[in-house]
Amino acid sequence: MSVGFIGAGQLAHALVKGFTAAGVIAAHRITASSPDNDLITVAGLRKMGVNMTTSNKEAVQKSDVLFLAVKPHIIPFVLDEIGPDIEDRHLIVSCAAGVTIGSIEKKLMQYRTNPKVMRIMTNTPVVVREGATVYATGTHAEVEDGRLLEQLMSSVGFCTEVEEDLIDPVTGLSGSGPAYAFTAVDALADGGVKMGLPRRLALRLGAQALLGAAKMLLDSEMHPGQLKDNVCSPGGATIHALHVMEAGGFRSLLINAVETSCIRTRELQFLADQEKISSAAIKKTTLDKVMQQPGVEQGGGVGVRTAGVSLFNNRHKK
Amino acid sequence: MASDLSHLKIGFIGAGNMAYGILKGILKSGDINPANVTVSAPSINNFPRFQELGVHVIHCNGDAVSEAQLVFLAVKPHFIRTVVNEVLPHLTERHIIVSVAAGVTLETLEQLLPAGVETVRLMPNLPCVLQEGALLFARGSCATPETASLLKHLLSACGSVEEGPESWIDIHTGLSGSGVAFVYLFAEAMAEGAVKMGMPSALAQRIAAQTMLGAGRMLRDSGKPAAVLRGEVCTPGGTTIYGLHALEKGGVRSAAMSAVEAATERARELGRK
């Protein structure tokens, strides 16, 4: 089995790192395409032994399972480009937040009657094989395709199938979740530093506390409230601290965060659906956006770096 | 009424917690013969506790309906349509259909059911299973005052039963359906306060529960309004008034109002879908 990635950014890099560490697929059986050779992640992927290319077409041809790991607004253009190259064997797995299976199938059905499409929402801890992934199955994907995807994604963490309408809430919870955790650990470390700990130690201990707590929760059948009770000795330090957190509306903040992320995901999907741009303007707009990504050289603006940008043509430029 | 009731046949579609609580309350009065009650559900998992009550348990919704005059639809809202379509051939004008499904309006029910069938929408809450429920029902266009009296009588052992216009059902959901969870949250928080002050958690939780229960009974049975009872506990300069002041500073009243409001609004939203 060969795996391809359209897009060679953070997500592709994290997934490849996880897959190869898990031994579920060898790096040389992975091909990743990116218009820009100077991204850090591109270098990282190349170092891992992945076949790098600037041709999306090549990534398609060399893969059976094809991950679409580009930003949501790029998806339509990628689909138009690779549409003609999709074969019966291909399983298209979109990782783009807010992009529906329906919209992908609609695009691909211009080129193929039964495109096999699946949609995943994963998160960055796949890089250390502790990802949280959900997937939804498209109209023409078979049960075996689901099993294959689940096998792949289970190698890098938790993976389960869901109905597509749950993917936005999942984005809010575990998609954005690591960011909430990073913020929490950063702030906990600040607290440690305020009370006298060296920063490095404070960060290490803060992260370990979260890791340990999460592991306890996942391993036990107990409700988190009960686990919390077990830590809080009567009149002790922890219950005093928890009171302060409750007074600050801690729980409500977390609920709000998940809700906001979910709503924003839906908003972005809605906005994407509304976009009606002329095809000439699309090329330039996308090019601009690609150029604006971090790590991309701003070599005097758009038009200067046309070499290597292969979103809209199949000719492999060097 | 008593002699009528000994011949009254009742059917339940669904064998979950609500069906159980309602049935238990109905049987408590002693007016209904368990042999005249049939409960239908797809799986046998829930049957044992119903069988203990002496009622019939079957896997056929149609039969539960055709045997009965009074039928409780106690299935999850998204099954209502399917169930009603299934039992349609067995329904006649002598049937009284009581739906317990959240968010399913009388209008929807009356569209699904044959004309002339009496329809009632009932909103219970979970403590029904312990016969301490708060129930509110609204009559559909064909349901008669006699039907209302019958229901009030039958359901009286479930807890409190009130009748109201349909517009109150969503409010009842917010206040009493979801309300039990608000009370659980408050109890949890009070117990945490006790833990902070030095009491072991398990004990604090038991005492918090009993405090809720005792206060609840005094609220219900004393005949005095909550504000008066509150005043009676507050000795001048004593512990309670200090604690209450902390609650007021925390904006608990506003939060409680907002909670009921939010739950009610959501019930309305779901009912519109």
Image (spheres, coloured by chain):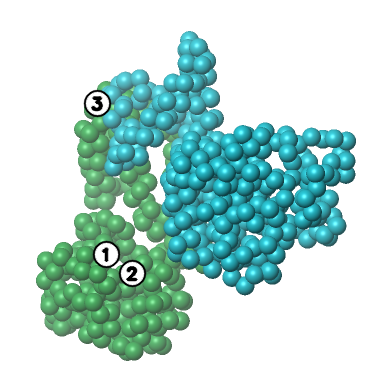
Chain colours: A cyan, B green
From this viewpoint, is residue A46 visible?
yes
Gap in Å between the C-alphas at discs 3 and 2? 43 Å
Reading the image, the residue beneath label 3 is B199
Marks 1 and 2 on same chain: yes
Labels 1 and 2: the sequence-earlier one: 1
Q: Residue at x 15, y 83 (%)?
A: B7
Give the amino acid at mark 2.
Answer: Val
Gap in Å between the C-alphas at discs 1 and 2? 8 Å
Image quadrant where one finds the C terminus of chain A: top right
Q: Kindly state the secondary structure of the residue where label 3 is placed.
A: loop
Nearest the eye: B183 or A179: A179
Do callouts 1 and 2 mark residues in contact (Cβ within 8 Å)? yes
Reading the image, the residue beneath label 1 is B16
Reading the image, the residue beneath label 2 is B75
Does residue B86 appear left or right of residue B158 in this picture?
right
The image shows residue A287, relative to residue B20, as above or below, that is above
Labels 3 and 2: the sequence-earlier one: 2
Residue A241 in the image: state x and y as whole percent. Answer: 40, 24
Residue A78 in the image: state x and y as whole percent. Answer: 70, 55
Residue A290 in the image: state x and y as whole percent. Answer: 76, 44
The chain under label 2 reads: B
Query: Mark 3 or 2, which is nearer the eye?
Result: 2
Q: Residue at x 25, y 59 (%)?
A: B128
Give the amino acid at mark 1.
Answer: Gly
Does residue A179 appear left or right of residue B216 in this picture?
right
Q: Which image quadrant for residue B104?
A: bottom left
Gap in Å between the C-alphas at discs 1 and 3? 37 Å
